[in-house]
Amino acid sequence: MTLLSSCVARKRAITRKTRPDQQLLVADKADLLNRIGAAYEELRSFNATVDMVPAIGSADKGAITEYKDIRAYIVYRRPVDIRLIGLYPVVRSKAFDMVSDGRDFKVYLPGKNRFVMGRNDLAAKSKNRMENLRPQHFLDAVVIRPVHTEDGWTILGNITDEETAVYLLQVVTRGKRPEDLRLTRQLWFDRATLEPVRQILFDEAGNIATDVRYKEWRRFDDIRFPRLIELNRPQDEYGVVITVLKMDVNEPLDDAKFALDQPAGVTVQVLGESRDGNPAGGSGKP
């Protein structure tokens, strides 16, 4: 009698988050890249009403503080235009108004009578964590960009075990030295649906810049979109949970939807060198 035949066999249940009877789907790298590209091309614009629950702190420091939900409106026009208007709970007065054209951003904070503007690639941070919210961070979260050849190399891994079943697509590019490689992006796909469930963007040092989780994918005007989006910016020590309440998709949006004019009498803060050559971080009355 062999060792195996003398042992008592015991079945072990697989406890993945997917339904036990749900068949796992099979895809290769080209399939997943095509899915991302096709979804991006389908979504030309949207106008969404959402609830946002902001939080400050970080898992590294062991403390996260959540704030009351904010009703907000997000307007997007491909490829890079985005605007967000947030309203305080109960009174529904304006908490913030922010816009980005892909290169520059503007943020108006009525409660502080402040108007902040600068380049999207600036890393200037405020001690007030909630003042570090930038429209381009939300753009990175709500719109999953396609992966292009010039982005670098892509590597696909199949992570399927007792607890999870995902495809992990990683984007790698050249580092500062030709012999160095740098991880820039990760996309996680649920093998039960092949929908994206997580996206991580890395900075040049390999640290997580943006970590986004996607849940409850559903159709809005025949376009699939996640109802729940969890955005985390660990280095800025803030996060936002976005719940989509209503979304109008692919309707024409003119430039006026993305025009944020500087109100009279506000304090203006320019991050980085301003158009007239003033030094970084300058502020003053217009």
Image: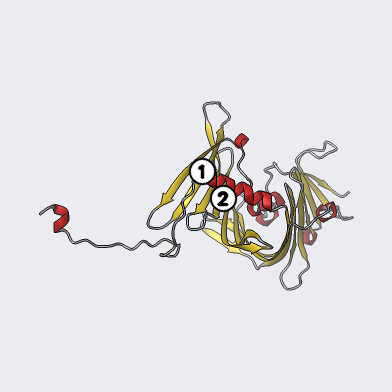
Label tally: 2
* Residue at the image position 87 percent from the left and 50 percent from the top: 285
Query: With respect to residue 228, does 278 lie above or below?
Result: above
Q: Which mark is residue 199?
A: 2
The residue that label 1 is drawn on is 29
The amino acid pointed to by label 2 is: Gln
Q: Quadrant of the N terminus?
A: bottom left
Distance, label 1 to label 2, CA atoms, is 16 Å
User: Which quadrant would residue 150 be assigned to in this image?
Assistant: top right
Residue 120 percent coordinates (x, y): 72, 44
Residue 282 percent coordinates (x, y): 79, 43
Q: Can you name the residue that lies furthest to the top here? A: 178
The amino acid pointed to by label 1 is: Lys
Q: Can you name the residue that lies furthest to the left here? A: 1
* Residue at the image position 65 percent from the left and 68 percent from the top: 68
**Which element type, helix, strand or loop, lies under badge 1?**
helix
Q: Earlier in the sequence, mark 1 or mark 2?
A: 1
Mark 1 or mark 2, which is nearer to you?
1
**Which element type, helix, strand or loop, lies under badge 2?**
strand
Residue 147 percent coordinates (x, y): 60, 42
Q: Please say if the residues under marks 1 and 2 sit with CB atoms less than 8 Å apart.
A: no
Residue 56 percent coordinates (x, y): 61, 58
Left or right: where 192 falls relative to 201: left
Query: Pointer 1: residues within 10 angstroms few (<14), some, or many (20+)?
Result: some
Q: Nearer the viewer, residue 280 or 120?
A: 120
Left or right: where 174 falls relative to 275: left
Q: Is residue 126 visible?
A: no
